[in-house]
Image (spheres, rainbow, N blue to C red):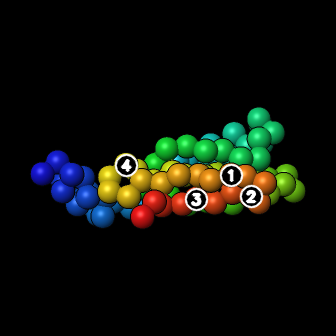
Amino acid sequence: EARKGSRRHTASTEPGLMDVNEKAVEAAFRDSGAEFIVHGHTHRPALHEYSIAGRTCVRAVLGDWHPQGSVLRWDARGYELMTPA
């Protein structure tokens, strides 16, 4: 029942409230010099790209644990956000 309630709440909530503060993300990239940030789920699992001071930066958001989960694969070929089958 708790999961059902959570899904109902998530579905009825404005998308911007279910994610991080974009200005804070941009500041983190700018202040740290990082070009890649990985963090846990915010209900928007994806690779989000930013242009910060002429650099392309990526925020990788991992999916939640229920039901799909996700992993970030990163090797010599590059990186990919994957949802296990």
Residue at the right extreme?
54
In terms of secondary structure, where does tag 4 sit? loop
Alpha carbon separation for disc pair 1 and 3: 9 Å
Marks 2 and 1: in contact by CB < 8 Å? yes
- Give the amino acid type for the residue marked by disc 3 in the picture: Leu
Q: Which residue is mark 3?
A: 81
Q: Which mark is residue 74?
A: 1
Furthest residue toward left? 1
Q: Sequence-wise, which precedes: disc 1 or disc 4? A: 4
Q: Report the Cα–Cα distance between label 4 and label 2.
A: 24 Å
What residue would you read off at disc 4?
65
Q: Position of residue 51 (x, y in %)?
A: 77, 58
Identify the mark nearer the N-term, 3 or 4. Answer: 4
Q: Is residue 8 above or below residue 34?
A: below
**Residue kind at label 1, given as amino acid type:** Trp
Distance from disc 2 to disc 3, alpha carbons, whole Å, reads 11 Å
Q: Residue at x 81, y 39 (%)?
A: 33
Count of number-bearing discs? 4
Give the class, few, some or many, for how many residues have Cα within 10 Å of label 4's Cα (few <14, many ≥20).
few
Residue at 42% x, 64% y: name it.
Answer: 85
